[in-house]
Amino acid sequence: MKAILFDHPGPPEVLYLGEIPVPSPGEGELLIRVRAAALNRADLLQRKGNYPALPGESPVLGLELAGEVVAVGPEVTQWTVGQAVCGLAGGGGYAEYALLREELALPLPEGWTWEMGAAIPEAFLTAWQSLVWLGKTQPGERVLIHAGASGVGTAAIQLARELGAEVWVTASSAKHTLCLELGAFQCIDYQTADFVEALRGYEQGVWPDVIVDCIGGSYFQRNLQALRMDGRLVILALMGGARPDHPDLSPLLRKRLTIMGSTLRNRNLEYKSQLARDLYAFAWPRFADGRLKPVIGKVFPWTEAVQAHEYMEANRNQGKIVLTLPWQ
């Protein structure tokens, strides 16, 4: 089968279309004919050599995909050949065929395109984990989402809105319209304003109960300043570096703050499968009636994977970037 490969870490140009064997589904696995796969920051890190595939997982890039079940392994009970699914993979999405654990497969919502399905799993599962499992977001609380127009950000805005929270985001001004349309209450242009000062200046000061942060080091101290008493900080990525600038931990004690960090990739199967079931129960009825939707910023044919990676690295996307495969 064809797959997007790279032989050594490097810039987007190391990616190329090559040939590898079609994988065989093992116990509890589905073989998926991949119709679309979405990009994640983890793909960029893996391509650079900074985030290798876990032992036993495909080294091919691609953590979320949509397609058809073409074969099932032993002990599979939930799915049959021909069903349309989307799901969270351990890797392998940038290929014509990929393996998916049956527990991590989700039905493609009726009437949806493959591209829409591929844009769900990683973004919405990460956002759900951040807001609910880790952040413990409650109705009436205030949530601040950094990089609000990213794939995870656009999912988090909608989920937080549906949870009854007041949503604030940081994003460049060109992306504010999208964030507001999705349900954000206020947007802060991180390029021209300090988000702590913006929060302080709104109606004598508003402070978030929960912050969902993919920036990391450069925002760490300001996140501690911004959180209200008993606030929760959930760190998902380190786009702004791993080292805080001049850290002062006194707000951590004074305000009884909780700081959590997490990725999905290194969680065990039981955790991820329960997370998927939890999201399914909450989100799929809302996908069906339009209250929730994946936001797709740009679609590339998979032969343009280099350009897709360049597009993400330039932070040009609003929502998900999706690769499509040319099946007839």
Image (spheres, helix red, strand yellow):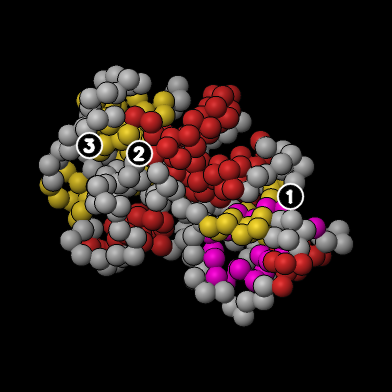
x, y percentage for residue 41?
41, 56
The residue indicated by pointer 3 is: 97
Q: Quadrant of the N terminus?
A: top left
- Whichever of callouts 3 and 2 sits on the residue coming sooner in the sequence is 2
Label 1, label 3: how many angstroms apart (C-alpha)? 42 Å
Q: Quadrant of the C terminus?
A: top left
x, y percentage for residue 301?
29, 45
User: Badge 2: how crowded within 10 Å, few (<14), some, or many (20+)?
Assistant: many
- Taking the image as shown, residue 161 lies to the left or right of residue 18, namely right
x, y percentage for residue 207?
77, 58
Considering every residue shown, the one lying at the far right of the view is 204
The residue indicated by pointer 2 is: 65
- Whichever of callouts 1 and 2 sits on the residue coming sooner in the sequence is 2
Query: Is residue 186 in view?
Result: no
- Residue interval drawn in magenta: 206-228
Three-letter code, disc 2: Leu
Query: Is residue 5 in view?
Result: yes
Considering every residue shown, the one lying at the far bottom of the view is 246
Give yes or no for residue 163 being in the magenta stretch.
no
